[in-house]
Amino acid sequence: MRLAFVLDRLHARARQNRWLRAFAVCNRLALAAGFIPAGLVKVAGERFTSLSNNHPMGHYLEALHHTGFYYPFIGVLQLTAALLLLLPGTAALGAVLFFPIILNICVLSVAMRFDGSLLTSPLMVLANLFLLCWYYDRLKFLLPFTQPPAPLMPPDGPSLSTRFPVSFFAGAAAAVALVVVGIHSFDVKPFNTLADCRAQFKGSPRTQAGSRFCACIHDQGRPLDQALAEYHRAPDDPAAAPPPTASASLIR
């Protein structure tokens, strides 16, 4: 059985499920809501966050803010992708335009361990991928294999399936769980402020190394990779000296 035929059948079945249709609408609205505020800030020429310039992400955002018309151009693209997603007739084009932007943000957030979008950007990538699959019938001709004639879709109405897609939503929940677990696998993060950075080391045996790591990021503005390398080379805190024994006290 040809791969294209299998994909066509799977897609047609998915499009006839009311739950998946509602899920697609929710994804469109959520993704658009994520880009509209960010795009408006860039179009207005305002700085996107209040991060210190010493922060790794602060370095990047400050430089981005001073790139002339390129900075509002990114905002225009974000707003365009969001508006296209809001309209059913252009949602497929919006999903295509949205994907490279959010993928770049996701990779940047993970590389910088940026707490502001470390969770949301991977989830937005997953939501965007779902929409690209949802509009497979419009985008499939971009794929590098021969396509059969597009199957006729039955009209909306009573023929729509109301069966809850347990397997799909279980897989979606598993994907979200993997993202959360992956984010929490980072042993150290710079966080957005010096206080939050130092707070992650409270109660651990590496408070001194952690304090130096946070100072490297927020006070000295050193690159994240260098700060992490120094942190991992640093020893644990020296063990507290044991209290004197009773016999030792008597001798003294």
Image (tube, helix red, strand yellow):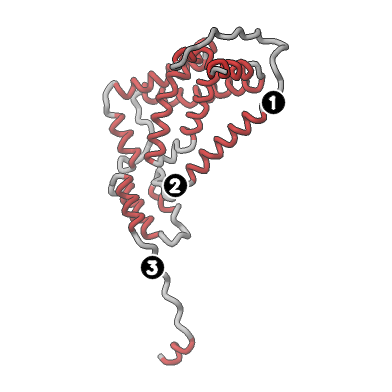
Q: Which residue is mark 2?
A: 186
> Which label sits in the foreground, 3 or 1?
1
Dot 3: within a 10 Å radius of its alpha carbon, few (fewer than 14), some, or many (20 or more) residues? Answer: few
At a point 66% along the width and 19% down the height, the residue shown is: 17
Which amino acid type corresponds to the residue marked 2 in the rendered image?
Phe
Compared to residue 150, the image places residue 178 above or below, namely below
At a point 28% along the width and 46% down the height, the residue shown is: 222
Compared to residue 175, the image places residue 191 above or below, namely below
Q: Earlier in the sequence, mark 2 or mark 3?
A: 2
Quadrant hosting residue 237: bottom left
Q: Is residue 135 visible?
A: no
The answer to whether mark 2 and mark 3 are in CB contact below 8 A is: no
Which amino acid type corresponds to the residue marked 3 in the rendered image?
Pro
Relative image position of residue 207 (x, y in whole percent):
40, 59
- What separation in Å lies between label 1 and label 2 (alpha carbons)? 36 Å
Q: Residue furthest bottom?
A: 251
Dot 2: within a 10 Å radius of its alpha carbon, few (fewer than 14), some, or many (20 or more) residues? Answer: few
The secondary structure type at the circle numbered 1 is: loop
Q: Earlier in the sequence, mark 1 or mark 2?
A: 1
Relative image position of residue 121 (x, y in whole percent):
46, 32
> Which label sits in the foreground, 2 or 3?
2
Q: Which mark is residue 164?
A: 1
Q: Is residue 188 visible?
A: yes
Which amino acid type corresponds to the residue marked 1 in the rendered image?
Phe
Q: Is residue 155 left or right of residue 143?
A: right
Q: Is residue 207 left or right of residue 10?
A: left
Q: Which residue is mark 3?
A: 238
Quarter of the image with the N terminus in it: top right
- What separation in Å lies between label 3 and label 1 (alpha carbons)? 57 Å
Quarter of the image with the C terminus in it: bottom left
